[in-house]
Amino acid sequence: TAHPQMMELFTKLFGDRFILDHCNMLNRTPGSIGRRWHAHQYRQGQYEVEDPIGTGHALTTEFLQRQCIRTLCYPEGATLEEGGELGVIPGAHLYRIPYKWNTERPDDDAAMKAGWLKGKVHAFTGKPLEMVRFSLPPGSMVSFPHHMPHHVGHRKPGTPTRWGLLIAYRTPDPDASPAKWTNAAHWVERAAAEGRLSAAARRVLEADNPLD
C-alpha cells in the first residue's frame, strides 16, 4: 500500500496527515469459519456518533473525518467458489455506525437483511443498500472504511489456504499524546484476559509493555 498511487488515494481520503494503524495476516485455511457481518470503531470508539447498533439517524453525504481505511490484499485471489470471500455493503459507511464492534457478531445474511439493513438507503442515490460479495482474481486489493459492515465467507473444505494481508491507515487521533505511538487494542486486551492469545502472539503484542 506504499505504492504512489495508493498514497495518492489515501491523501484524497485523509488529507496530508495519516498514519499506519495496524497490519495483520488474515489467512483462511481449508474448512475455516468465516466472519459474520460486523464493522470496527475509530480508535477506542470515543468519537463515534452512534452506538454499535445505530439508529440510522447519522446518514450523511459527507466523508466523515476521523477515518480508518482497511486495505485487504489477496495475492492468490479470493473467490465465491472456494469461500473465504469478502462481502461489503457499499454506501453503508455514510451511516457511520461501527456495527457490532464490541458485541456478539452472529448476523448472517438473513439476520442482517431483517435487522440492521432494513430500510437503510444510499445517501446519494436513495436506493436501498445491498450486500455485495467479491470474487477476486490473484493480486487484487480492496479498500473500504473501517466502520463499513463487512463479512468473510466460510472457506470450503479441500480448498487451498486463502492468503490475505490487511493494512489499515487512519487519521491521527486528535487527542493522542504526540510522544505515544499507539494504544492497546480492545480485542488484544480482551483476548489476553481470557487466555486466548498464543505464546507467539503475546511476544508480538507485548513489545516493551507486558500484557499482565
Image: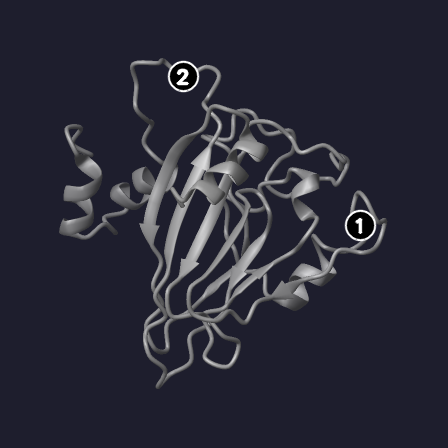
Pick out the residue farthest to the right: 126
The residue positioned 80% from the left and 50% from the top of the image is 121
User: Taking 143 as reference, is 170 above or below it?
Assistant: above
Does the rendering let one see residue 41? no
Q: Which mark is residue 28?
A: none
Report which quarter residue 50 is drawn in.
top right
Q: Residues within 10 Å of mark 2 (few under 14, many from 20)?
A: few
The residue positioned 70% from the left and 48% from the top of the image is 91
**Distance between mark 2 and mark 1 Cα atoms:** 35 Å
Does the rendering let one see residue 85? yes
Dot 2 corresponds to which residue? 176
User: Taking 101 as reference, is 35 above or below it?
Assistant: below
**Image location (x, y in percent) of residue 188:** 31, 41
Q: Hey, what amino acid is under mark 1? A: Val
Scheme of image coloration: one colour
The residue positioned 56% from the left and 25% from the top of the image is 47
Dot 1 corresponds to which residue? 121
Q: Hey, what amino acid is under mark 2? A: Ala
Count of numbered circles on the image: 2
Left or right: residue 167 versus residue 151 is left
User: Taking 158 as reference, is 165 above or below it?
Assistant: above
Q: Quarter of the image containing the C terminus? A: top left
Pick out the residue farthest to the front: 4
**Image location (x, y in percent) of residue 49:** 64, 29
**Image location (x, y in percent) of residue 48:** 59, 29
What secondary structure is found at the residue carrying circle 1? Answer: loop
Left or right: residue 58 versus residue 98 is right
The residue positioned 51% from the left and 30% from the top of the image is 45
